[in-house]
């Protein structure tokens, strides 16, 4: 259950000398939500999360935890906890000693510590006899779970994660993504997760914030971001996409030379407005004649790629641009490289990104 605002960032900026790593960031994080911040390398994700946990101070702006300003409070005085990519476990100590570390700092008695460690082993689905196992003898995935158990032993109000799975191999990463989502549901805690992998964000999150060059481009659910991106950056970041420039002053509304559309199609652009028309590859189909769909292009098949259960087709349009089409394996297109075909899609499967006028 997602509740009231737990953390509020207001006008946060961070400068390193003349370089502005974060520019006027504002965001509300809700109690119990799983929020993921996604962005390319160097976009400012780690810088932001360091401010949120108290490892660094903002140049400007406020951070409020349940209404109380905390931007000057050091990390060890905040009820938050960070899980890093490098797990920072004590390799020569046991799993139990690692998990109990936060409880030891708080001077909890040994029997209470061990009881809690066992509960956390159960929660993370590690066998209880791992309590005595050394970290160095655990696999990568097990170590990741121990790090999570230790983070939970702090009993933080918010857990922050900075790309904790990026060093793991694909299968383990996939398994842990699901476990993290499940752990979030079982603990009811607020999770703020950073990744550069969109797939990871889509699997786990309630909301996704897309970061680009120190600013948020869009904050919304995965579905909204996928179907209705606010910018070309977001559209392209969210997987394969076909984009066409459109121009409200053209009679057809279409500036892209290879694209045709049914007459009197209302794209929602007024005169001198510009925009980009987006269509995802899975909405494009092979059609028999011009006008059998709202939009169409002539495309020459350049290449076909098999991606497990799906296929990607790359077509070359008349103006040299590329059109990507996606089909399920069982809906394979009946054309071979070099064939020219008509490809169409309908207006309800498009999205207009306005860019002004
Ligand atoms: P991300 O985590 O999204 O990959 P970072 O937040 O680590 O990005 O970095 C954002 C930008 O800020 C990068 O250009 C990086 O070089 C710069 N940066 C980060 N930390 C420092 C620092 N301590 N001093 C100078 N520049 C920094
Ligand atoms: Mg980083």
Image (cartoon, grey):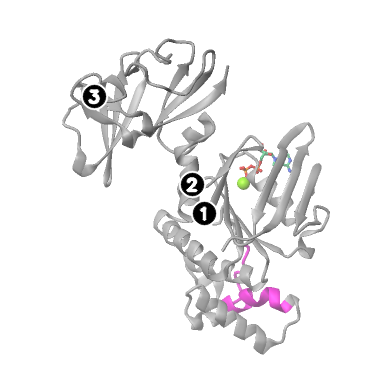
> Where is residue 231, by image quadrant?
top right
* SS category of the residue bearing label 1: loop
Please tell me whether residue 96 belongs to the stretch shown in magenta.
Answer: yes
Q: Residues within 10 Å of mark 3 (few under 14, many from 20)?
A: some
Apparent side of residue 338 relative to residue 278 in the rendered image (left or right)? left
Task: Compute the Cα span from label 2 to label 1.
Answer: 8 Å
CB atoms of marks 2 and 1 within 8 Å: yes
> Where is residue 10, by image quadrant?
top right
Residue at the extreme left: 334
Give the residue number, with chain letter if any, for mark 1: 205
Residue at the image position 77 percent from the left and 64 percent from the top: 76
Residue at the image position 67 percent from the left and 50 percent from the top: 28
Nearest the viewer among 263 and 133 is 263
x then y, percent, for residue 146: 56, 70
Residue at the image position 47 percent from the left and 58 percent from the top: 177
Give the residue number, with chain letter if any, for mark 2: 222
The first of marks 1 and 3 along the sequence is: 1
Q: Residues within 10 Å of mark 1 (few under 14, many from 20)?
A: many
Is residue 125 placed above or below 284 in the rendered structure? below
CB atoms of marks 1 and 3 within 8 Å: no
x then y, percent, for residue 286: 22, 28
Count of number-bearing discs: 3
From where the camera sits, is residue 58 visible? no
* SS category of the residue bearing label 2: helix
Nearest the viewer among 67 and 216 is 67
Please tell me whether residue 251 belongs to the stretch shown in magenta.
Answer: no
Task: Compute the Cα span from label 1 to label 3.
Answer: 38 Å
For the N terminus, the image quarter is bottom right
Q: Is mark 2 within 8 Å of ligand 1?
A: no
Task: Compute the Cα span from label 3 to label 2.
Answer: 31 Å
Nearest the viewer among 54 and 143 is 54
x then y, percent, for residue 318: 31, 14
């Amino acid at each position: 259950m997602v509740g009231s605002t737990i953390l509020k960032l207001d006008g946060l900026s961070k400068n390193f000398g003349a370089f502005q790593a974060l520019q006027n960031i504002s965001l509300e994080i809700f109690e119990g939500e799983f929020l993921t911040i996604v962005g390319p390398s160097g976009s400012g994700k780690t810088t932001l999360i360091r401010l949120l946990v108290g490892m660094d101070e903002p140049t400007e702006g406020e951070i409020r935890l349940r209404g109380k300003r905390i931007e000057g409070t050091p990390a060890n005085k905040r009820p938050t906890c960070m899980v890093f990519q490098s797990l920072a476990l004590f390799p020569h100590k046991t799993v139990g000693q690692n998990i109990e570390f936060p409880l030891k700092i708080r001077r909890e008695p040994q029997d209470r510590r061990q009881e809690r460690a066992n509960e956390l082993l159960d929660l993370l689905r590690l066998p209880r006899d791992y309590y005595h196992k050394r970290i160095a003898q655990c696999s990568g995935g097990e170590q990741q779970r121990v790090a999570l158990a230790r983070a939970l032993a702090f009993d933080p109000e918010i857990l922050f994660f900075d790309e904790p799975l990026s060093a793991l191999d694909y299968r383990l990463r996939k398994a842990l993504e699901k476990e993290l989502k499940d752990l979030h549901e079982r603990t009811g805690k607020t999770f703020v997760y950073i990744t550069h992998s969109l797939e990871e964000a889509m699997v786990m999150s309630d909301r996704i914030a897309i970061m680009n060059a120190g600013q948020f481009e869009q904050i919304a659910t995965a579905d909204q971001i996928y179907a209705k991106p606010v910018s070309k950056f977001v559209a392209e970041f969210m997987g394969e996409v076909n984009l066409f420039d459109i121009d409200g002053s053209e009679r057809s509304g279409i500036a892209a030379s290879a694209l045709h559309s049914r007459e009197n199609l209302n794209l929602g652009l007024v005169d001198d407005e510009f925009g980009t028309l987006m269509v995802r590859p899975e909405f494009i189909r092979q059609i028999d004649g011009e006008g059998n769909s709202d939009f169409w292009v002539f495309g020459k098949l350049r290449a076909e790629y098999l991606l497990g259960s799906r296929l990607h087709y790359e077509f070359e349009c008349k103006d040299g641009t590329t059109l990507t089409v996606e089909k399920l394996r069982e809906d394979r297109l009946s054309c071979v490289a070099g064939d020219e075909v008509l490809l169409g899609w309908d207006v309800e499967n498009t999205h207009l990104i306005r860019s002004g006028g």
